[in-house]
Image (cartoon, helix red, strand yellow):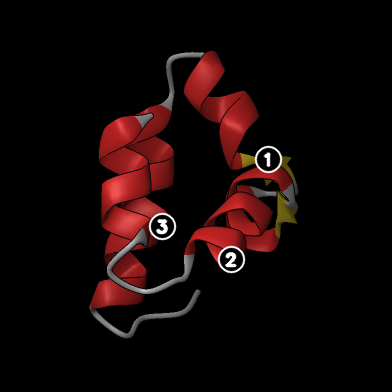
Amino acid sequence: MSAVVARLAEFFTPQEIRIWLFAKHPLLNGARATDLIDAGEAHRVLEVIESLSEGVYV
């Protein structure tokens, strides 16, 4: 989780990070980032964050 939070901190404030992690996210097929991280799928979350850094929105 810390790698995900560190990466998100490049784009968002701490409050925005909490919202991003716990909200259902369309780029994660409606899943919450925290649920995917807990399920061992942090790589999916990091892929979406990487698309943010590249300015790519799917």
* Residue 38 x, y percent position in the rendering: 54, 16
The amino acid on which the numbered mark 1 sits, given as a three-letter code, is Arg
- Within 10 Å of the Cα at label 2, are there few (<14), some (14-19), or many (20+) other Cα atoms? few
- Above or below 55: residue 50: above
State if disc 2 and disc 3 touch (CB < 8 Å). no
Task: Give the labeled residue for mark 1.
Answer: 32
For the view shown, which residue lies furthest in the top direction?
Answer: 39
As rendered, which of 57 and 17 lies closer to the eye? 17
Which residue is painted at 50% across and 60% down in the image? Answer: 14
- Within 10 Å of the Cα at label 3, are there few (<14), some (14-19), or many (20+) other Cα atoms? some
**From the viewer's perspective, is the residue at label 3 or at label 2 nearer?**
2
* Residue 22 x, y percent position in the rendering: 70, 44
State if disc 2 and disc 1 touch (CB < 8 Å). no
Numbered circle sitting on residue 16: 2
Whichever of callouts 3 and 2 sits on the residue coming sooner in the sequence is: 2
The amino acid on which the numbered mark 2 sits, given as a three-letter code, is Glu
- Within 10 Å of the Cα at label 1, are there few (<14), some (14-19), or many (20+) other Cα atoms? some
